[in-house]
């Protein structure tokens, strides 16, 4: 499991010890928190990790008041990645102070969490980060709902060398039905991307014991859009991605780029 934090200060200190500095990216629509580990020399691809949906719901009917994760799984995965240039991005409305959070529409951590304007904000953020690190290529990694964002982002960019998702509900409408949940009105569904959308080489990790995102939710997406499913026996939605991430990364084919 990943570390649990009580405050943004604790998260920032933990990330700083692992070479990440925090910055805020204003995209016009959203303020996204980023933790950036800059390379000493600009080479290879920038690996972008996108956080999951964040804080757990207190009950099935009550979303959290603040979606900031107390266990940021994608940040822990990013810290375990040995690549020189690694970026972590939070989700809309995460990591905000109380005043900013009051002005952030809760729909963006409920039904509109995968809306087109959300994906557009990541598009802006990633382009800006690439420019600041002077790197031309990307790899996108997303955990849980962050994997949905990563897939939607990969579909609209031409500079992504690889897409990696971890326990991500890539067939959203099927996933909503499976959980008997309210429809994610206004959200985009990766499994419904048009036929002419080309995806980069993709690896989709699924826990063999994951009841939150069972393998068929991912397999349906792969049948339509390609890629490769890696089912990891004995893992569930939370365990044990962070613990074994360095070795799991070895299963992802990497195209090395000199630039």
Image (spheres, grey):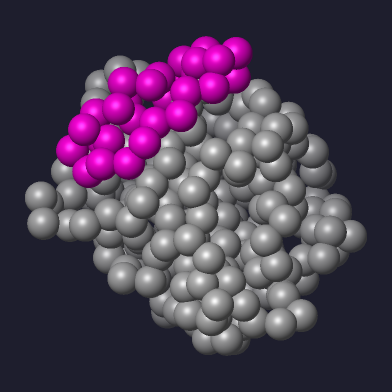
Q: Looking at the picture, does residue 207 appear above or below residue 54?
A: above
Q: How many marks?
A: 0
Name the one closer to the observer, 27 or 45: 45
The verdict on residue 219 being magenta is yes
Which quadrant of the view contains residue 217?
top left
Reply above or below: 80 against 24.
above
Residue plotted at (85% across, 54% down)? 14
From the viewer's perspective, is 99 left or right of 41?
Answer: left
Quarter holding the N terminus is top right
On the rendered structure, is 257 left or right of 221? right
Q: Quadrant of residue 58?
A: top right
Query: Residue 203's image quarter?
Result: top left
- The percent coordinates of residue 151 (x first, y second) are 35, 51
Q: Position of residue 80 (x, y in %)?
A: 73, 48
Residue 37 drawn at (x, y percent): 72, 69
Q: Residue at x 62, y 60 (%)?
A: 88
Res 217 seen here: yes
Residue closest to the far left? 195
Residue found 17% across the figure and 43% down from its top: 192
Asked if residue 84 is positioned above or below residue 213 in the image, the reply reads below
Q: Is residue 173 visible?
A: no
The residue nearer to you, when weighing 178 against 253, is 253
Q: Is residue 70 magenta?
A: no
- Residue 36 vertical placement versus 184 (above, below): below
Q: Residue 225 at what x, y percent from top left?
A: 22, 43
- Quadrant of the image containing the C terminus: bottom right
What range is drawn magenta here?
208-236
């Amino acid at each position: 499991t990943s570390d649990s934090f009580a405050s943004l200060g604790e998260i920032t200190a933990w990330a700083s010890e692992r070479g990440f500095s925090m910055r805020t990216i204003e995209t016009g629509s959203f303020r996204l928190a980023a933790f950036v580990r800059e390379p000493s020399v600009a080479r290879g691809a920038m690996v972008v990790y996108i956080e999951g949906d964040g804080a757990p719901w207190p009950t099935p009917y009550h979303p959290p008041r603040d979606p900031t994760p107390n266990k940021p799984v994608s940040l822990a995965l990013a810290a375990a990645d040995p690549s020189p240039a690694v970026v972590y991005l939070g989700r809309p409305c995460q990591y905000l102070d109380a005043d900013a959070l009051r002005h952030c529409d809760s729909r963006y951590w409920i039904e509109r969490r995968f809306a087109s304007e959300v994906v557009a904000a990541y598009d802006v953020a990633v382009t800006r980060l690439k420019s600041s690190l002077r790197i031309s290529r990307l790899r996108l990694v997303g955990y849980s709902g962050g994997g949905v964002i990563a897939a939607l982002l990969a579909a609209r960019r031409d500079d992504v060398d690889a897409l990696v998702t971890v326990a991500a509900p890539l067939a959203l409408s099927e996933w909503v039905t499976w959980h008997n949940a309210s429809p994610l009105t206004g959200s985009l569904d990766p499994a419904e991307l048009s036929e002419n959308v080309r995806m980069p080489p993709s690896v989709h990790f699924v826990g063999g014991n994951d009841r939150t995102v069972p393998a068929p939710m991912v397999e349906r997406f792969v049948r339509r859009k390609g890629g490769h499913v890696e089912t990891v026996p004995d893992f569930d939605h939370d365990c044990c991605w962070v613990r074994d991430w360095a070795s799991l990364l070895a299963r992802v084919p990497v195209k090395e780029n000199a630039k």
